[in-house]
Amino acid sequence: MVKINTCIFISGKGSNLKNLINRSRDYNFPISIKLVVSNKKEALGIQHAKRNFIPYLIIDTKSRNFEHRLLIDLKKYNISLICLAGYMKILSKRFLRDFGKKVINIHPSLLPKFKGLKTFAKILKNKEKKTGCTVHFVDEKLDNGKIISQRFFFIDPTDNEDKIKNKTQKLEYLVFPESIIKIFRNR
Ligand code: GAR
């Protein structure tokens, strides 16, 4: 199978990156991870790139022209899909237009509910009955864009932020791969 050259953007732990690296080893899984990008040099997730011999780039989002330089690297690796996996920055409208290919993001809530940061605290404060995660196409607005897949669970009265986070992340490891399969199913 001809696989889609993919770049994963991270800012932290990279457990979704690790999961996608593992899944991408399946012959039938549609992507091959060619590059990892992190905006934090201390991000733990970089270790997953290193261990798996995947090239990685550290970007400085404060430097002028960083998006322009990033686009050159994405071209160099012939990237056709960007997956934002815990990447905590917004990509500009111009970057998305110039990249011109698919960019998807995972978010730990049932969007359009609870965009942005402190998601689990907001969910508890709002006394939600259920929550989950969403994979969606990225546009220039925060946690916006067409939804590809969601999964949910019912919140237990004993759940705290950590428990909700753990339950959500377990679902993320299913939803991210299934969303990727879904968008490339009919190619
Ligand atoms: C994930 O739970 C992801 O949904 C969230 O960051 C976490 C990264 O975990 N993303 C956002 O909040 C984006 N708005 P990971 O580094 O272990 O994959």
Image: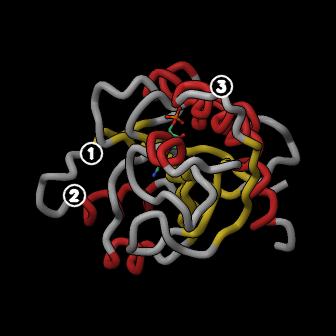
- How far apart marks 1 and 2 lie (CA) works out to 7 Å
Q: Does residue 15 lie above or below 88 as drawn?
A: above
- Residue labelled with disc 2: 66
- At 37% from the left edge and 48% from the top edge, which residue is drawn? 88
Tell whether 1 sits left or right of 54: right
Residue drawn 38% across the image and 77% down it:
98
| Label 2: element kind | helix
The image position of residue 69, as x and y in percent, is 26, 59
Instruction: Pinpoint residue 7: horizontal percent, then vertical percent.
Output: 52, 50
Image coordinates of residue 14 in percent, x first then y, are 51, 32
Ligand 1 within 8 Å of the CB at mark 2? no
Identify the mark nearer the N-term, 1 or 3: 1
**The C terminus: image quadrant:** bottom right
* Residue behind mark 3: 158
> How many neighbours does mark 2 have within 10 angstroms: few (below 14), some (14-19), or many (20 or more)?
few
Label 1 CB, ligand 1: below 8 Å?
no
Q: Quadrant of residue 134?
A: bottom right
Looking at the rendered structure, the secondary structure element under dot 1 is loop
The amino acid marked with disc number 3 is Thr
Left/right placement of residue 148 relative to residue 81 reads right
Along the polypeptide, which appears first: circle 2 or circle 3? 2
- The reply to whether the C-beta atoms of the residues labelled 1 and 2 are less than 8 Å apart is yes
- Amino acid under label 1? Ile
Does residue 85 sit above or below 138 in this rendering?
A: above
> What amino acid type is highlighted by mark number 2?
Phe
Color encoding of the figure? secondary structure
Residue located beneath label 1 in the image: 59
